[in-house]
Image (cartoon, grey):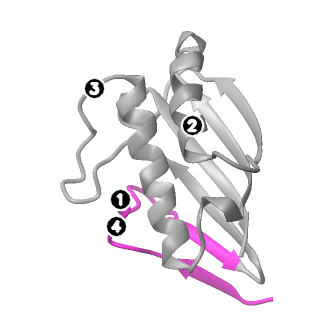
Amino acid sequence: MEKKIIATPHAPKAIGPYSQAVRTGNLLYVSGQIPLDPASGEMVQGGIKEQTERVLKNITAIMEEVGGTLDNVVKTTVYLQDMAHFADMNGVYAGFFKSSPPARATVQVAALPKNALVEIDAIAVI
């Protein structure tokens, strides 16, 4: 199978040796997205709600780059700096995945890049 690197200026550039996403066949693997504004490269201001919204907008932009939408997402993993943010993150998340939400795991981690409060990765079928 061919491996195709996916990149869009509408999501943050990779801040390390990885790709925004990789497509192989009809599967798309979206790297963990943190709440970086794609225009400035800076973290968004605000708390968990604002950060979750930015992360999901970044994932949406990557999905759109391959002609998909969030409806194509079949699995996500949510990494939270503090599980006390779960309810607020979940409320924003629900607004992006209104019908047929993907399978999901949510875990608390010790730290995230750039001290983000949330990071989300995704797997989609295109």
Looking at the rendered structure, which numbered label has been put on residue 31? none
> What's the residue type where badge 2 is placed?
Tyr
Mark 3 and mark 4: span between their CA atoms? 20 Å
Mark 2 and mark 4: span between their CA atoms? 20 Å
Mark 1 and mark 2: span between their CA atoms? 19 Å
Region in magenta: 1-23
Disc 3: which residue: 46
At mark 1, the secondary structure is: loop
Depth check, front residue: 99 or 12: 99
Give the percent coordinates (x, y) of residue 61. Answer: 44, 65
> What's the residue type where badge 1 is placed?
Pro
At mark 4, the secondary structure is: loop
Label 1 crowd bin: few (<14), some (14–19), many (20+), radius 10 Å: many
At mark 2, the secondary structure is: helix
Give the percent coordinates (x, y) of residue 100. Answer: 76, 50
Answer above or below: position of 36 versus 12: above
Disc 1: which residue: 12
Residue 109 among magenta residues? no
